[in-house]
Image (tube, rainbow, N blue to C red):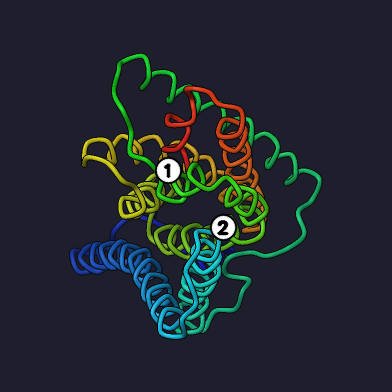
Amino acid sequence: MSTDQRTSSSGSSVSPDSDARSLRARIRALLVAVLLAGLGIAVGSVLVLAAGLLLRLAGVPITPVLSIVISLALATGVGFGGVALLYLWYRDFDISYVGVRVPSLREFGYVVGGYFLTLGLVFSAAVVISSVGVEGGTNNAAQIGMENPEVLLLLIPASILLIGPGEELLYRGVVQNRIRERFPAVVAIPVASLIFASIHYVSLSGAPSARLISIAVLVLPTLVFGTVYELTDNIVVPSLLHGAYNATLFSGLYFFVKYGGEMQQQAAFLFG
């Protein structure tokens, strides 16, 4: 987001009235961010349910592969992307609000560095969780992939082409930016990351405590995504990073499913 579209939160107050207005503006920014996050999930879910109903009425069987295709296209693409673009239209902003350009060599460096950092953080967290004997929730898409490995082969390119761009456009480009208008980066990034991780509660299976563990782990890579976005002001950079991260996890899960191994259940809760 361009500098002139951000509102500084470091200026001193000049009156009680301005203090009250500033507080209301900050609360509004947080509420709008949460609403946008939830709206993306709600719109995507309605579209997927409607498409599934129409296909069943038409006598088309819903295979695991078709289910994933519908979810990716309608939930991640139309749902997340559509909500983000409608919000920009509502506020009379163009796409420059989120920052879209071909990454520079330096920005590709952020992708590479962020990629190794996210994997290191997440796998370190997985080792700690395993060592203390607790279990995280299982990502539903990963669970379908473990039962139908061909789905994982679809999810690998989809991570880069749809999942990364769709989720980043909404949750970094719009949600994080909206918070950033009223808060400094040190607040906006973790709050947006927590919102993004929390909305995955519905896409996880398992006990509530297990889902919360997975959400806590998911905060780690999203902190990196948000920081990279703040540093580059280019939504393409965290989109590539997010896509590469997910593609790597799906590739690893496919390897464990095909060739066996005790890590596939542990790996299934790492996706975001």
Specify few, some or many for label 2: CA neighbours under 10 Å numbering under 14, 14-19, or 20 or more. Answer: many
* Residue 23 spot, x, y in % from top left: 24, 62
**Pointer 1: what residue?**
186
3D distance between C-alphas at marks 2 and 1: 26 Å
Eyeballing the image, is 120 above or below 208?
above
| Mark 1 residue type | Val
Specify few, some or many for label 1: CA neighbours under 10 Å numbering under 14, 14-19, or 20 or more. Answer: few
Query: Where on the picture, by quarter, is residue 101?
Result: bottom right
* Residue 18 spot, x, y in % from top left: 25, 67
Which one is in front in this view, the residue at disc 2 or the one at disc 1? 2
**SS category of the residue bearing label 1:** helix
User: What's the residue at 38%, 79% (across, down)?
Assistant: 53
* Residue 99 spot, x, y in % from top left: 63, 64
**Pointer 2: what residue?**
163
User: What's the residue at 35%, 37% (across, down)?
Assistant: 214
Could you tell which of marks 2 and 1 lies nearer the N-terminus? Answer: 2
User: What's the residue at 58%, 42% (across, down)?
Assistant: 250
